[in-house]
Image: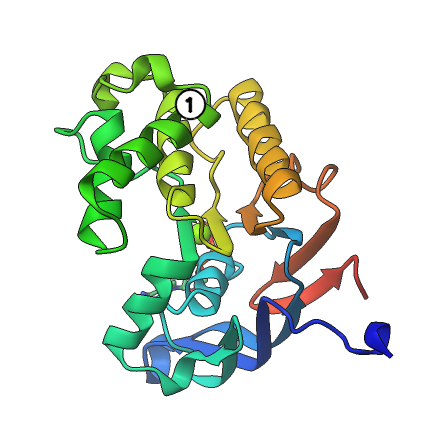
Amino acid sequence: MANSIKELPAILLIDIYKSYGQGESKVDALKNINLDIAKGEFLALCGPSGSGKSTLLNILSGIDKPSAGAAIFLNKALNDLNEDQLSFVRSRHLGFIFQFFNLIPVLSALDNVYYPLVLNGNYGVKEARERALHYLDSVGLAQLANRKPGQLSGGQQQRVAIARALAHEPQVVVADEPTGNLDLATGEAILDLLMKINEETKTTFIVSTHSTQLKDRARRVIEIKDGELVYDTAQ
Ligand SMILES: Nc1ncnc2c1ncn2[C@@H]1O[C@H](COP(=O)(O)OP(=O)(O)OP(=O)(O)O)[C@@H](O)[C@H]1O
Ligand SMILES: [Mg+2]
């Protein structure tokens, strides 16, 4: 009977709608999105600029609330959680990677990875430092750990951001156009790295892009247009 029990998904979106503004200026950014993302999946989210990718990522990771519908993140209905509970879930189980890296310029690469570990209260000073170094090493940056973001290339900065997103071993990593600010070759190397980490750790990855780079490489690709899910390789 064991194989008749389907494992619960990492993320489940049910009839999600999201609108911004009111009246004349109302924008329907997401319309009737239903999505089921399995644990360990690597999902590419494609769609043109303005199609609703960032809105969708923010809702599935509890950064923003839908106007209607339910978002379930690791079996928790996000609508039922207050702000403190949401930030707790995010700090423990979510890693977020941004297009513009969002590193703190005055801190070294090491401290950019280290401080969130200590500030989120998950780790003591010694363990946080060891972890930060380990994850910088795993993205190939151990030698540059003492440099500040301004002394690193775009691809190197994104590697620091990846180490930061992974260092607390979240179950879900969300990346919003992580290659959008990088040249093609550097972007491909970053995508290879994310896919390798996904294969090695079985962490769930959801990665948005408006380029075709990921479309050809990810196992599952979904596409949104004007806020609607128009394509899903799993369907
Ligand atoms: N805070 C906001 N207030 C009003 N409208 C918004 C807001 N955020 C997004 N929108 C609108 O919602 C729609 C979807 O935006 P979203 O940022 O999700 O698109 P996207 O697919 O991420 O685009 P890009 O590829 O350019 O990042 C767009 O029409 C956008 O103008
Ligand atoms: Mg976006």
Q: Position of residue 29 (x, y in %)?
A: 47, 70
Does residue 191 lie above or below 117 as drawn?
above
Residue 103 visible here: no
Horizontal side of residue 133 vs 42, given as left or right: left
Q: Quadrant of the C terminus?
A: bottom right
Is the CB of mark 1 within 8 Å of ligand 2? no
Q: Residue at x 71, y 43 (%)?
A: 218
The residue closer to the viewer here, 81 or 15, is: 81
Residue 103 position (above or below residue 157): below
| Residue in front for this viewpoint, 24 or 95 | 95
Classify residue 67 as left or right of residue 208.
Answer: left
Classify residue 201 by image quadrant. Answer: top right
Percent of width and height locating residue 108? 20, 25
Q: Which residue is drawn at 41% across and 63% down?
A: 58
- Residue positioned 22% across, 18% down in the render: 146
Q: Position of residue 54 (x, y in %)?
A: 45, 57
Residue located beneath label 1 in the image: 137
Residue 110, image x, y percentages: 26, 28
Is 56 situated above or below 174?
below
The image's colouring method is rainbow
Q: In this view, does 222 lie to the left or right of 178?
A: right
* 114 or 25: nearer the viewer: 114
Q: Is mark 1 on a helix, strand or loop?
A: helix
In the picture, the quarter occupied by the N terminus is bottom right
Task: Please give the count of numbered marks on the rendered protein.
Answer: 1
In the picture as drawn, the residue positioned furthest to the left comes out as: 106
The disc labelled 1 sits on which kind of residue? Asp
Asked if residue 181 can be seen in this view, the reply is yes
Residues packed near mark 1 inside 10 Å, few (<14), some (14 to 19) or many (20 plus): some
